[in-house]
Amino acid sequence: MKQHHVVAAIICHKNKYLCVQRGENKYPYVAFKYEFPGGKVEPGESNTVALRREIHEELQMDIQVGELFASVYYEYPDFAITMDSYLCTTKSPQLCLNEHIAYQWLRKEDLQTVSWAPADIPVVEKLMDVQRHDIEFTY
Ligand SMILES: Nc1nc2c([nH]c(=O)n2[C@H]2C[C@H](O)[C@@H](COP(=O)(O)OP(=O)(O)OP(=O)(O)O)O2)c(=O)[nH]1
C-alpha cells in the first residue's frame, strides 16, 4: 500500500484552533472532511520546512512551528499516512483559502462540531483531553 508522510499544523490564535475543510476528492472518505492544514513532506525536506511551505501555499499565512503534538498512523482503503502534527502559532489570523473550501477557528471544546478526516480524530481527542487536564490543574 502507498505510504505518505504528512505534516499538519495545529494553529492556535487567541485560544481558537484553525480547522480547514477539504473539497471534492477522488477518495470519498476524505472529501469535504475537516483537517489541520498541511500536506506531504517532500524528499529531503524537514517537517518544519514542509509545514511552513504548505501553510504558505494553502493559506498564505506565516506560522511559528512549536512542539510535536501527536504522530498518527492511519490506513485508508487506498493508501496509508503517517501524520506528524505540531502545535503552531501565528501573529496574524488572516488567511487566503487557496485549496480548501471553508475554514473555522474553533475553541477546543467545539472541535467535535465538524466532521474530521478519520486520521485526525485521535489528534482532536488528545487536544480536547489536554483541555480537561488544564481545567483540573487550574482549579
Ligand atoms: N494536510 C492534512 N492531510 C490530512 C490530514 N488528515 C488526513 O487524513 N490527511 C490526508 C489527506 C491526504 O490524503 C493526505 C495529505 O495530502 P495533501 O494535503 O498533500 O493532499 P492531497 O493528497 O489531496 O493532494 P496532492 O498533493 O496529492 O495533490 O493526508 C490533515 O489533518 N491534514
Image (cartoon, grey):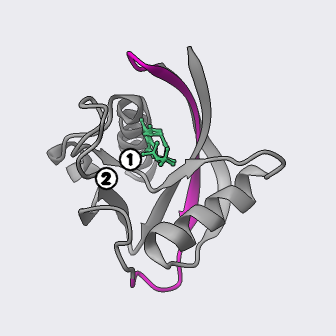
Q: Does residue 8 appear in the picture of this structure? A: no
Name the spot of residue 34 as percent of width and height, x first: 28, 47
Q: Which residue lies furthest to the left in this view?
A: 113
Amino acid at dot 2: Lys
Query: In the depicted view, which residue is nearer to us: 108 or 25?
Result: 25
Residue 109 - label: none
Mark 1 nearby-residue class (10 Å; few <14, some 14–19, many ≥20): some
Q: Which secondary structure type mostly characterizes the magenta part of the structure?
A: strand
Q: For the residues labelled 1 and 2, say whether their Cβ atoms are less than 8 Å apart.
A: yes
Name the spot of residue 60 as percent of width and height, x first: 49, 79
* Disc 2 target residue: 108
Q: What residue is at 53 percent from the left and 67 percent from the top?
A: 55
The image shows residue 64, relative to residue 80, as above or below, that is below
* Residue stretch in magenta: 75-94
The image shows residue 34, relative to residue 77, as above or below, that is below
Q: Is mark 1 on a helix, strand or loop?
A: helix
Amino acid at dot 1: Gln
Which of label 1 and label 2 is nearer to you? 2
Q: What residue is at 72 percent from the left and 50 percent from the top?
A: 47
Name the spot of residue 28 as percent of width and height, x first: 24, 31
Q: Which residue lies furthest to the front in this view?
A: 26
Residue 109 relative to residue 67: left or right: left
Q: Residue furthest right?
A: 44
Q: What residue is at 41 percent from the left and 81 percent from the top?
A: 93
Asked where in the image residue 37 lies, by quadrant, the reply is: bottom left
* Disc 1 target residue: 131
Label 1 CB, ligand 1: below 8 Å?
A: no
Q: Does residue 114 appear in the picture of this structure? A: yes
Asked if residue 80 is among those painted magenta in the image, a careful observer would answer yes
Separation of marks 1 and 2 at Cα, in angstroms: 7 Å
